[in-house]
Amino acid sequence: MSAATFVNLPVADLDRAVEFFTALGFTARPRQPGADSAQLTLGDSTHLILHTPAAFAAFTGAGCATPPPAGR
């Protein structure tokens, strides 16, 4: 039996992030319209959970840092 890896990340634009990781080879699981999180898989044991900042804060019980604007 192999161990599964789950990585949870906050993202500013959920749809764009799903598109990006799908282009890298991840497979997106179906999600409900308006959902605040998305699960993607790579192989049998690697799972990536992308969250909006609000969903990430609710999941972790802590907020997430706001990155500086691009170009800084």
Image (cartoon, grey):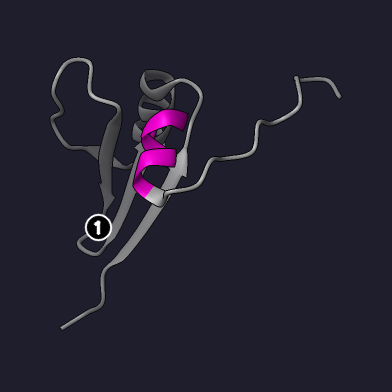
* Vertical comparison of 7 with 15: above or below: below
Q: Quadrant of the C terminus?
A: top right
Judge from the rendering whether residue 12 lies leftward or rightward of residue 6; answer left or right. right
Rendered image quadrant of residue 22:
top left
Q: Secondary structure at mark 1?
A: loop
Residue 18 on the magenta span: no
Q: Residue at x 45, y 44 (%)?
A: 9
Q: Quadrant of the N terminus?
A: bottom left
Q: Residue at x 76, y 27 (%)?
A: 68
Label 1: how many residues lie within 10 Å, few (<14), some (14-19) or many (20+)?
few
Most common secondary structure along the magenta stretch:
helix
Q: Which residues are magenta?
A: 51-59
Amino acid, disc 1: Gly
Judge from the rendering whether residue 65 lies leftward or rightward of residue 2; answer left or right. right
Q: Residue at x 16, y 37 (%)?
A: 29
* Vertical comparison of 13 with 5: above or below: above
Residue 61, horizontal then vertical, whole percent? 42, 49
Residue 54 on the magenta span: yes
* Vertical comparison of 21 with 47: above or below: above
Residue 19, horizontal then vertical, whole percent? 37, 24
Judge from the rendering whether residue 67 lies leftward or rightward of residue 48; answer left or right. right
Which residue was labeled with disc 1? Answer: 43
Residue 65, horizontal then vertical, whole percent? 64, 38
Q: Residue furthest bottom?
A: 1
Rendered image quadrant of residue 28:
top left
* Residue 52 in view (yes/no): no
Q: Residue furthest top?
A: 33
Residue 30, horizontal then vertical, whole percent? 13, 30
* Residue 13 in view (yes/no): yes
* Vertical comparison of 34 with 18: above or below: above
Q: Residue furthest right?
A: 72
